[in-house]
Amino acid sequence: MLCFTVLLALLSIPTYAADGADLKISVLRYEPAPAEIGEYVSVWVKLENLGFARADDVSIRMVPEYPFSLDSQSNAIEDIGILSPDNAAVHEYRLFVDSGAREGLSTFEVWYQEDGSGTWFKKEFEMRVGSDTFDSRGTIQLDGTPVIDPEVFMPGDEGTITFALKNSATEYSITLDGEQYDTNARIQSASLESLDEVKVTTESYYGNGVLGPGESLDLTYNIEVGEDTPDGTYYLDLSLVGSSHVYNNNWRIPLKVDSSSVRVIPSKPLVLENGKGVLEFDVANIHPNLLSSVSVQLDAEGVEFSPIEYFIGAMDPDELFTIEFDAEAVDEDQDFPVDLVISANFRNGLNEHSQEIDTRQLRHQSLEDDGNSGIVIAFGLLMVAGVAAYVLYKRKMKRED
């Protein structure tokens, strides 16, 4: 059984870029796989900067060896220019496979230059050359909807996308033009492409087994969303190489980014009376998916709150929860109003977030404590009782007369 893989062989040549840049070169994929004898093959080369400083005047150069040759020597060098930290460039080369090539693994080199000084670094790669080796007729399909966790990302989040790939065949063999073929399916490679805003940190999958009719395979890729990613829907390309280039597939996978989170709204006036009070808030989850470990904290100069942190827990989208804090001024001479800072902690998937939600004004009012009020009330009650007694006495006197 042949295994169509891209094998990376790092030569014993330094690959460290100067001034804090750290360049890494790789081959994302090639199509068709295997590369067909006497035909062109497209090779996608990726150069990324893993360092902490930018690389200037970056170039890559394709240096093929027999049986490969470039479609044109003028296309050998690609000038990338500046490559900032955590950024990458992808370039497609087209190589011709000589008609006299033999089936098997063949090598080619990719060089890169980091500063225009004339010094090149290089790596050697291997590519499978052959024909449509597999006669299997099973077809790989996506089984259901990809499972994205968290369902909707926030800027700066990390998570996963899991795909279920299934052999759609229902029988173990099929007859075409009088010939019988098995319906096994092969996944030679499966890669999920990164975007500028969304980075896929899991390497491409390379398989060497088969899926029988109705069997499935789960593939999971780790995802990172940039801190400054705007809200919106981003599309990642899942590229799959099947038994041969005839069975390749490409799917566009939507990934949503939404920065909305928790809203905390006062449901009663934010006022202390004689230095004490109960503050009430409505807490709403306005993010499109469930948030867990939701809690709210208050902070104001010279004021203590109980509880220190109000823990709510999990909140479904659009769920509303009402909470209360006891508040008390620490110093009788505390100046009001004071800024009341409202903060929330929560999790989106496994990502912990801590946000300052709002700043409000906490006010104070003093109520006079009249010490004679009890005496006045008691005197009033005695007066009422006396009047009632007098009325009863008069009625009794009239009946005796």
Image (tube, rainbow, N blue to C red):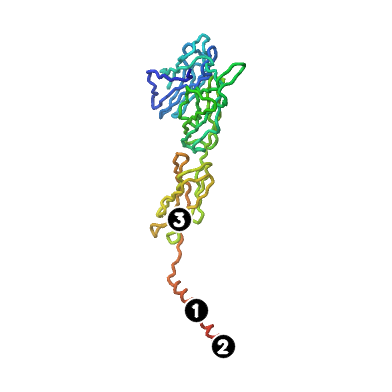
Give 365 or 314, whichever is nearer the viewer: 314
- Can you give x and y, in whole percent of width and height, for residue 94 in the image? 52, 17
Residue drawn at the location 46% of the way across and 12% of the way down: 65
- Can you give x and y, in whole percent of width and height, for residue 238 in the image? 53, 27
Question: How busy is the neighbourhood of tag 1: few (under 14 within 10 Å), some, or many (20 plus)?
Answer: few
The answer to whether the residues at label 3 and label 1 have Cβ atoms under 8 Å apart is: no
**Alpha carbon distance from label 3 to label 1:** 47 Å
Q: Report the disc number at residue 337.
A: 3
Earlier along the polypeptide chain: callout 3 or callout 1? 3
**Alpha carbon distance from label 2 to label 3:** 67 Å
Which mark's residue is nearer the viewer, 3 or 1? 1
Q: Could you say whether the residue bearing mark 1 is in a helix, strand or loop?
A: helix
Q: Amino acid at mark 2?
A: Arg
Q: How many marks?
A: 3
Quarter holding the C terminus? bottom right
Return the residue at label 2: 399
Q: Furthest residue to the top?
A: 100
